[in-house]
Image (cartoon, helix red, strand yellow):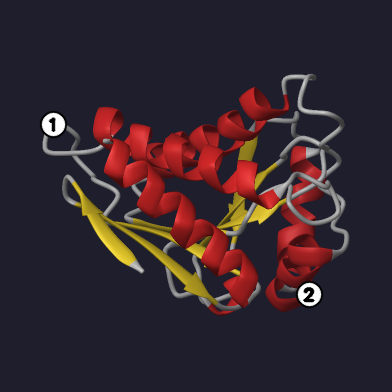
Amino acid sequence: METKINSTILSLIKGDITNEETDAIVNAANSRLAGGGGVDGAIHRAGGPKIMEECRKIGSCPTGGAVITTGGNLKAKYVIHTVGPVYRDGKNREAELLSSAYRKSLELAVSKGIKSIAFPSISTGAYGYPIDEAAEIALKTVIDFIQTKVGARHAVPLQIIRFVLFSERDLKVYEGALKKITQIN
C-alpha cells in the first residue's frame, strides 16, 4: 500500500528490513545499543561488526531517542537506532515515547540529508506494545512530521518513508490504520 503526502511517498510492505535499499533503515534497539533479538539482532547479524563497533563508541540511547551508525554490510548506508518503550499498561508515557522514537529518527534522517528511510514496527515485538495502537501512533507521527517538517521549504525532503512489516498480519494492521488516518485528514 502506498500514498503520497506532500512530496513524500509513504509505503507499507511486508518484508525483511535488512534487505532494504533505502538510504537508512531504522533499528528497534535497546538503550544499551547492545544488539539483541528480533529486528535488532537481524540488523546486527546482516550488517556485520562495524555497526556494533560504532554502537559501542556511542554507548547508549535513551528511550524515545535516536542515534545513527554506518550500515556496515547492509544495502542501506545508515542505521538509525531508536529505543521504543516497553509496554506496561499504556499509562506510563508509552505513546509519547513511541511517538518520540519515530520523530527523533526522522529528525536525525533529515539532519543527515537522508532521502529514503525504512522503519520496522517499533516496540511491538519483545517490548509488547499492542500493534493496533502502535501502528496508529507510528503513522500519525510520520504523517504529522511530513506535513509540518518536510517539503519545499526544506533543502532535502524525505522522498520515501517505508514501513517494512515482518508478517502479513502486521501489514494488514498498518494498512487498516493508514486508511483510518488518511480518511480523518
Vertical position of residue 125 compared to residue 143: above or below: below
Q: CA separation, marks 2 and 1?
A: 39 Å
Q: In which quarter of the image is residue 15?
A: bottom right
The residue carrying pointer 1 sits among few (fewer than 14), some (14 to 19) or many (20 or more) residues within 10 Å by Cα, namely few
| Residue at numbered disc 1 | 153
Vertical position of residue 65 compared to residue 109: above or below: above
Q: Position of residue 50 (x, y in %)?
A: 72, 65
Q: Please, what secondary structure does the residue beneath circle 1 have?
A: loop
Vertical position of residue 113 compared to residue 1: above or below: above
- Which residue is at 60% across, 59% downward? 120
- Which residue is at 50% across, 69% downward? 76
**Direction from residue 122 to residue 154 in the image, left or right:** left
**Direction from residue 119 to residue 178 in the image, left or right:** left
Q: Quadrant of residue 146?
A: top left
Q: Where is residue 115 in the image (x, y as percent from the top left)?
A: 32, 55
**Considering depth in this image, is 51 or 33 the residue closer to the camera?**
33
Q: Which residue lies furthest to the left in this view?
A: 152
Q: In which quarter of the image is residue 134?
A: top right
Which amino acid type is shown beneath numbered disc 1?
Arg
Which amino acid type is shown beneath numbered disc 2?
Arg
Q: Where is residue 28 in the image (x, y as percent from the top left)?
A: 70, 51
**Direction from residue 120 to residue 45 in the image, left or right:** right
**Considering depth in this image, is 29 or 169 the residue closer to the camera?**
169
Label placed on residue 45: 2
- Which residue is at 78% across, 75% downward? 45
**Residue 118 shows in this picture:** no
Tell me which numbered mark, 2 or 1, is placed earlier along the sequence: 2
- Which residue is at 35% across, 32% downward? 144
